[in-house]
Amino acid sequence: MSAVRELSEIRGWVLDAACGTGSMVPLFESGGFEGKLLMIDASGKMVRKARERARESGLEVEVILGDVNRLPFKAGCVDGIACIFSITTVRRPVTAISEFTRCLRGDGKLVVLDSERPEGPVVRLLYPALVPISRIFCHTHIDRDVERMIRAGSGWSKRTEKAYFGGMVKLYSFSGQV
């Protein structure tokens, strides 16, 4: 997965923010990641599943029950952050981005894979129907302007952007605070 490739060269701590069941662990492991993975999620059920995945891996992983809106870490303590389909699901995304900014080292890297407003003509036609469906059934806000929120709340500069599914999903890499 491209998100993992963006973080694979980091040898220090990488935070998987709102990690869910820990589905990124096997991807980090197969992607040659040699750093340490720190995972956090607000759901006890998800954290238990993530811990199972972590135990089965050969990676150094610590899984924590906690809220991305109040990260229990010192300022500047992580070298990278993976935020996979989380900005559109957390209740207070601006607060979470502020916490990422606080915890990420000044020369660190933030990688975000999330929903965005689509660019492709076919997907744009379907999008108005998908927004309420995603809120009702998935409890997600696919209409959030993820890139704008990150730029406004972090001061990071965007390094890369890649679109998938007609632009409805985007992978962003941000680094270094400006």
Image (cartoon, grey):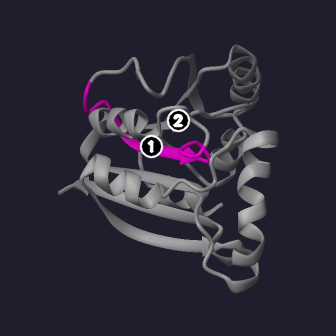
**Residue under label 1:** 81
Which quadrant would the N terminus be assigned to in this image?
bottom right
- Taking the image as shown, residue 51 lies to the left or right of residue 87, namely right
Q: Residues within 10 Å of mark 2 (few under 14, many from 20)?
A: many
Q: Where's residue 137, x and y in %?
A: 82, 41
Magenta range: 75-88
Label 1: how many Cα within 10 Å (few below 14, some 14–19, many 20+):
many
Q: Residue 104 lies in what quarter of the image?
A: top left
Q: Nearer the viewer, residue 87 or 108?
A: 87
- Could you tell me which secondary element the residue under label 1 belongs to? strand
Question: What SS does tag 2 mark?
Answer: strand
- Please check the rendered image and state whether residue 162 is part of the magenta-colored stretch, yes or no: no
Residue 31 percent across, percent down from the top left: 63, 55
- Residue at coordinates 29% horizontally, 48% vertically from top-left? 154
155 with respect to 66 (left or right): left
| Labels 2 & 1 near each other (Cβ < 8 A) | yes
**Is residue 32 among what the camera can see?**
yes
Report the residue at 42% width, 34% height from top. Answer: 96
The residue that disc 2 covers is 17
Which of the marked residues, 2 or 1, is nearer the chain's N terminus?
2
101 or 116, nearer to the observer: 116
Alpha-carbon span between mark 2 and mark 1:
7 Å
Is residue 83 rendered magenta in the image? yes
Quadrant housing residue 89: top right
Residue 8 seen in render? no
Q: Quadrant of the C terminus?
A: bottom left
Q: x%, y% of residue 78? A: 36, 35
